Image: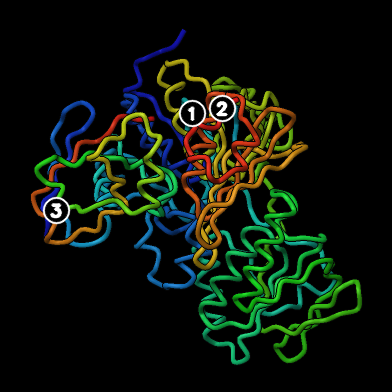
Amino acid sequence: MIDNNTETKTCVVIGASHGGVNFAFSLRKEGWLGKIILIDKDPLLPYHRPPLSKSYLTNGDGMDANLLKSKESYDKDQVELLLGVSVGEIDKEEKYIGLNNGTKLSYDKLVLATGARPFIPPITGIETATDLFPLRTGRDVENIRAAFEKSISKKIVIIGGGYIGLETAASLKKLGGEVTVLEREARVLARVTAPEMSSFFMELHKKNGVDVLVDKNVVSIDNTEGVNTISCGDGSSYDADIIIVGVGIKVNSELAMEAGLTLENGIEVDETAKTSDASIYAIGDCTYHFNPHYNRKIRLESVQNAVDQAKVAAAAICGKSPVYDSIPWFWSDQYDVKLQMVGLSNDYDEIVHRSEEGDNKFSIWYFKGSELLAVDAVNNPKAFVVGTKFLKQSKLIDKAKLKDNSVVFKPVNLLK
Amino acid sequence: MAKITFITRENETVTLEGTSGSVMQLAVDNNVPGIDGDCGGVCSCATCHVHVDTAHTSKTGEASEIEADMLELNDHANAQSRLCCQLEISEDLDGVVLQVAEAE
């Protein structure tokens, strides 16, 4: 039985980033009349995260330019913000959460939008490094900017050639830094893209004057008089005033674990974003969820997933029966290159490359047999939207026509 | 200062005043239903799709190639379609009327 009388109820949301904020406003839109309390340990008014490694870093226009919502919108929709506050425990039997300031907050529904935090690898000497930062929060970016201004050599080493590492490299280069990226694998973006894309981005960074080095396993960091020396397993070493660490994340699932919720590669949720407890939902990067399109359980680090699960959870809590069935999509901006990705390319067995007229305008299509799995579109939104359409409709594509850029880029022309 | 009017999917009229930034941000800051702006305004998500009133298309100008490509296969796109994250607020937009497009 769903109780639709929400007037006297309280919904508490832990985590006020893309997931939590979108959830709070969606819940109001779905008709929730009771209290909505949105908590985050980050003291800043919630902001867009993707620009952190891009325009925030380069423009320095402050956080106000990229707020998820204005201060007034929270007041208007009566979303109470508790910022700069940590949550210490969840008692799912008594249905309350305990804040680190000693306050207890009762809830009728609880939403975990706790996201993830940067993984800091246990490199020998890492604790002695000066001006070493991850890049996940507004504060991180402010710290990086301050360190950059202070630095005389402007030498920066970025550990990790994933999206965060590469976007940060492009941004710091733009600011005038001397940037070296150290990637442990044999190619950058190894976990998420085809070798062809890795080569493209390696070249792009080289052309722009960033040293991207692969097969570089960082084994130790020494600090002498404020200069960090980063040493790799192959004997090479690099000096830097500033080190950025972008080697992946750890899911913030400790609260859920201590509360006894079911965990598996994150907080396990069903198709309505509900956890193993009927009053607790979880959304975003911290969730392990089923994706109907790929017919398997996945965990995603993306804005799209956070926002879409937020909408699903809000509808479910308000008594509807939504089903989460989004096709994942992502984007990255580096220099003047716009990369848009749709789908999940894991387990592909064939790549189709399509080039368009003009510089650096192409797309990579990932197939498993005849099934399209994903598309990476470089400066090519058309490929992104055509790919999205195909994925949604699960139609069979004629690979020969797809490859041939004299065939006009429309779904109807590319069907088998 | 520009007055910008949104007509929502529920046919409600919302008129807002803005001085700078994108039309998408103005709509998001004022909770205009149907304008989500999930990607933060980098023309990557198409969740800020509007139809410009036919009388006002000269105020908004034409979509860029990227924007047009993003809209090309949208079921609800027409000749009046714009992604309003790409509309910068200026005096030129004063009086413009934008219909929030249906969700994809």
Please tell me the numbered disc located at residue A415.
Answer: 2
Using residue A39 as the reference point, say whether residue A208 is left or right of it: right
Q: Position of residue A104 (x, y in %)?
A: 50, 39
* Residue at image point 68% right, 23% down: A295
Element carrying mark 2: loop
Q: Secondary structure at mark 1?
A: helix
Q: Residue at the spot x=46%, y=25% of the render?
A: A108
The amino acid at mark 2 is Leu
Asked if marks 1 and 2 touch (Cβ < 8 Å), the reply is yes
Task: In this rendered view, identify the residue nearer to me: B54 or A66.
Answer: B54
B81 left or right of A111?
Answer: left
Residue A412 circle label: 1
* Position of residue A150 measured from the top left corner of the image (x, y, whole percent): 55, 87
Residue neighbourhood size for the residue with mark 2, other residues' Cα within 10 Å, grouped as few (<14), some (14–19), many (≥20): some
Subunit that carries the residue with mark 2? A
Q: Chain of mark 1?
A: A
Q: Which residue is disc 3 drawn over?
A: B59
Picture quadrant where residue A196 is located: bottom right
* Residue A243 appears in the rendering: yes
- Horizontal and vertical percent for residue A357? 51, 56
Q: Amino acid at mark 1?
A: Val
Task: State the separation of the CA atoms marked 1 and 2.
Answer: 6 Å
Labels 1, 2: one chain? yes
* Chain at numbered mark 3: B
Query: How much space separates mark 1 and mark 3, taking CA atoms?
Result: 34 Å
